[in-house]
Image: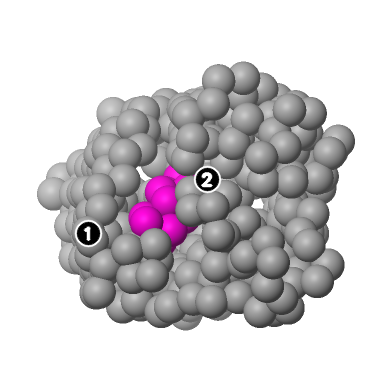
């Protein structure tokens, strides 16, 4: 029985691999104003969210501020059975993921009244993922079978002290340290390779801490032009938690299972970015950004299971590019913002599963508004993201699930700023 359990947990964890390190868990950005401009903010970076986009931007600020905000995301995803995946009784036709509103808060404090040295502290969520599915038409006689047997929930909180220095009137440099806390909750099912079992479900929950950082440089060759260069260091979060496996027999109502202490490392990618901003046209700010994210760092994960054989899970992720465009028009009291971005998915077909939010390359459309009432600012943003349909036609069990994938997401962001 112990050998059977070991075999089942390795099988189920392998099917969880792409959820554990999904490119889809990288959020599109931080800060209502920046996201309203499609994330094209590295060359401008003139509010407190510069700690995320380009910490060098802090050096050109001249007021202290406190900012609070949040992002609210409603993802929607569909998976269509290719009609021949019958070995584990997957539901026929098209299945839609459970819809739920997800919230990611942020807060910033900047101290910027000194002539050259500026600093601040940010708390935000740069990574978040969640989806829930009911894909398996299970035996009605089974007890304790989960209602939604496939799900993922990942969130990483970044406590981010930052500092910037104005080297020259038109040149600055900045850096930030990431103190990160991450949580993971995952659920998956898969066929049993042992004749006495029909199916096995796996639930993983864990948490851990890690450290990282980012760097930035900003150069203003003219009063109406600025350039930004940024880099994010690769980082890792060491996760500890539990893995529970339940095995369901074709002849028994109650499952049998076991719980294992589990340790693994969540790898986060390095990133480099370039930004350009110009105010050459009166009242209009135009921004252009490019970011290159090194997701290929996620080649595999080493799983350390107490009481079960360790396992290496392969991912074969790919590096990605993102291009962002943004504009802000000053109407006096009000500011109107537009933005868009095109972003590649790092996930190859060989590791695509329904629990991934990032099912393909995507395009966004962003609309935002901002206004200051004295020393209190209000910003709001709406974002729509459309994903390219993906059809997975080649089976790579247990790392992927064949079928047709579609997804989209609606999100909103609101921010409040007090300057003093």
Label 2 Cα neighbours within 10 Å, binned few <14 / some 14-19 / many ≥20 = many
Q: Rounded to the nearest whole Å, what is the CA distance between mark 1 and mark 2?
A: 26 Å
In magenta segment, residue 394: no
- Circle number at residue 310: 1
View extreme (top): residue: 393
What residue does disc 2 label? 24
Residue found at x 25% / y 53%:
311
Q: Nearer the viewer, mark 1 or mark 2?
A: 1
Q: What percent of the width, then of the height, locates residue 218?
A: 27, 41
Q: Nearer the viewer, residue 400 or 232?
A: 400
In magenta segment, residue 11: yes
Helix, strand, or loop for circle 2? Answer: helix
Quadrant of residue 417 within the rendered picture: bottom right
Q: Does residue 375 sit above or below 215 in this rendering? A: below
Q: Does residue 12 sit above or below 385 in this rendering? A: below
Q: What percent of the width, then of the height, locates residue 297?
A: 25, 39
Give the overall secondary structure of the magenta segment: helix
Q: Does residue 85 sit above or below 57 in this rendering? A: above
Q: Which residues are magenta?
A: 7-18
Q: Does residue 240 sit above or below 300 in this rendering? A: below
Residue found at x 66% / y 22%:
391
Residue found at x 32% / y 63%:
3
Helix, strand, or loop for circle 1? Answer: loop
């Amino acid at each position: 029985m112990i050998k059977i359990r070991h075999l089942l947990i390795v099988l189920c964890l392998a099917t969880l691999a792409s959820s554990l390190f999904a490119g889809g868990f990288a959020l599109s950005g931080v800060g209502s104003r920046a996201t309203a401009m499609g994330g094209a903010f590295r060359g401008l970076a003139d509010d407190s969210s510069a700690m995320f986009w380009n910490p060098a931007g802090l050096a050109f600020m001249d007021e202290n501020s406190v900012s609070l905000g949040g992002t609210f995301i409603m993802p929607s995803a569909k998976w269509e059975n290719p009609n021949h995946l019958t070995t584990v009784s997957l539901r026929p036709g098209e299945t839609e993921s459970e819809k739920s509103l997800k919230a990611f808060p942020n807060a910033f404090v900047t101290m910027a009244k000194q002539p050259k040295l500026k600093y601040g502290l940010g708390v935000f969520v740069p990574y978040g993922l969640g989806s829930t599915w009911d894909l398996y038409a299970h035996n009605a006689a089974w007890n304790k079978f989960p209602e939604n047997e496939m799900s993922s929930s990942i969130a990483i909180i970044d406590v981010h002290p930052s500092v910037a220095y104005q080297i020259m009137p038109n040149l600055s440099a900045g850096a930030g340290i990431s103190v990160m806390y991450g949580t993971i909750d995952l659920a998956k099912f898969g066929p049993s390779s042992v004749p006495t079992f029909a199916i096995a479900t796996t639930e993983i929950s864990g948490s851990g801490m890690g450290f990282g950082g980012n760097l930035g440089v900003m150069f203003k060759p003219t009063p109406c032009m600025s350039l930004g260069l940024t880099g994010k260091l690769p980082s890792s979060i060491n996760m500890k938690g539990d893995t529970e496996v339940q095995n369901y027999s074709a002849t028994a109502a109650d499952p049998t299972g076991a719980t294992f202490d589990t340790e693994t490392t969540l790898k986060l990618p390095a990133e480099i970015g370039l930004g350009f901003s110009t105010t050459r046209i009166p009242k209009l700010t135009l921004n252009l950004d490019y970011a290159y994210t090194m997701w290929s760092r996620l080649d595999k994960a080493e799983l350390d299971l107490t009481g079960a054989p360790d396992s290496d899970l392969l991912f074969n992720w790919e590096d990605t590019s993102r291009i962002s465009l943004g504009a802000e028009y000053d109407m006096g009291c009000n500011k109107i913002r537009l933005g868009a971005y095109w972003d590649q998915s790092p996930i190859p077909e060989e590791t695509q599963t329904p629990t991934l939010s990032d099912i393909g390359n995507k395009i966004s459309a962003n609309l935002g508004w901002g206004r200051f009432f004295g020393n209190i600012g209000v910003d709001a943003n709406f974002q729509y993201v459309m994903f390219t349909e993906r059809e997975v036609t080649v089976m790579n069990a247990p790392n992927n699930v064949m079928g047709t994938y579609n997804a989209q997401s609606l999100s909103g962001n609101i921010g409040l700023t007090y300057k003093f």
